[in-house]
Image (cartoon, grey):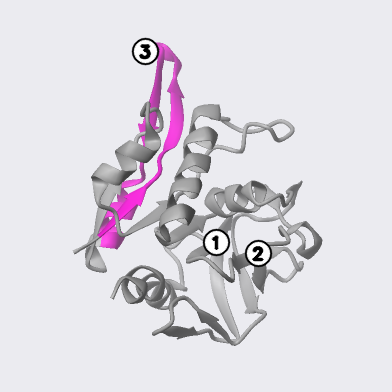
Amino acid sequence: MTRLGLTQRVEVIEDYGERRDCLDQAWTTLLEGWGYQPIPLPNTVNQPSRFLDSMDLDGIILTSGNDLAHLDNPTQPAPERDEFERKILEWALDRSVPVLGVCRGLELINDYFGGSLSTIQDHVATEHSVAFEVETLELSRSAELYFPTEIQVNSYHNYGISPEEVAKDLTLLATAPDQTAEAFFHPKHPLLGIMWHPERDARSTSFDHKLFDALFTSINQ
C-alpha cells in the first residue's frame, strides 16, 4: 500500500498549556478509501531527514491550517511547522519523493521557491470554478493526467497568489475566476500544489482521486 506522510496543523490549547499537532480525521477516511496508508508527521522531530528516511514514505501531503508565521497578521502561526515543512521539501526534492501541497501547503511551496502571497477576499467557506491553464500535466515519464477545462471546488483561504506572485520555478496550472492561482506544479520535480481541499466535501472528488493516483501511484511504478 502506498504510504503518504501528512503534515499536521498546530493548535494552541491554552487551558492545558499545550501546542498540539492535529490532523482532520477526514484525511484518513479519504486516503484509506482510495487505497493509501496515511502517516501523520509530527512537527518537532529533532532530525527531520533521518526521521523521514526511516518512514519509508512514497509521498508527502502538506496539509492546510496555520498561516505562514512571517505574513502580516497571521492566524494561528506555527513557526515550528513552517521550519519542518521546509525541511520536508528539501528532503523530498533531494530524493524525488512526490509532494502535494493543499491550500496552506500550496502557499508554503510558493513561498519556499521565492513567490509571494497577498490577502484576498471572498475565498472562505465558498465554492467557485477553476479553469486549467494547460491541457495535460506530465507527472512521470509513463503517465499523464488529462485535465478538464473547468471544475468546481471548495475554497477556504484568506491569502491568494496572483499570476505575477507565482514563483518563477513553478508553472501556473489553474486559476480562480479572479485569476488567483488555484494550482501549480514544478516542471522538473513531482511537486504539485492545489488551493482546494480534497478531504472536505467537494464536487471535485472524482478528479482529485485521479490527481492523487497520477502523482503518488503512477510515479512510483
Q: Nearer the viewer, residue 82 or 157?
A: 82
Residue at (43% x, 77% y) in the render: 140
The numbered dot on residue 161 is none
Q: Is residue 74 magenta?
A: no
> Residue 126 location, x and y as percent?
59, 59
Return the residue at label 2: 170
The numbered dot on residue 193 is 1
Residue at (25% x, 46% y) in the render: 55
> Residue 132 location, x and y as percent?
63, 79
Please name the amino acid that badge 2 sits on. Leu
Q: Residues within 10 Å of mark 2 (few under 14, many from 20)?
A: many
What is the spatial separation of the Cα atoms under label 1 and label 2, in whole angstroms?
10 Å
Q: How many numbered marks does the figure carry?
A: 3
**Secondary structure of the residue carrying numbered label 1:** strand
Q: Residue furthest front?
A: 94
Residue 175 is left or right of residue 47, and the answer is right
The C terminus sits in image quarter: bottom left
The numbered dot on residue 16 is 3
The N terminus sits in image quarter: bottom left
Query: Does the residue at mark 1 contact the one at mark 2 (Cβ under 8 Å)?
Result: yes
Residue 35 is left or right of residue 138, and the answer is left
Please name the amino acid that badge 1 sits on. Gly
The answer to which image quadrant residue 10 occupies is top left
The answer to which image quadrant residue 179 occupies is bottom right
Of mark 3 and mark 2, the one earlier in the sequence is 3
Magenta-highlighted residues:
3-31
What is the spatial separation of the Cα atoms under label 3 and label 2, in whole angstroms?
41 Å
Q: Is residue 21 magenta?
A: yes
Q: Nearer the viewer, residue 124 or 198?
A: 198
**Secondary structure of the residue carrying numbered label 2:** loop
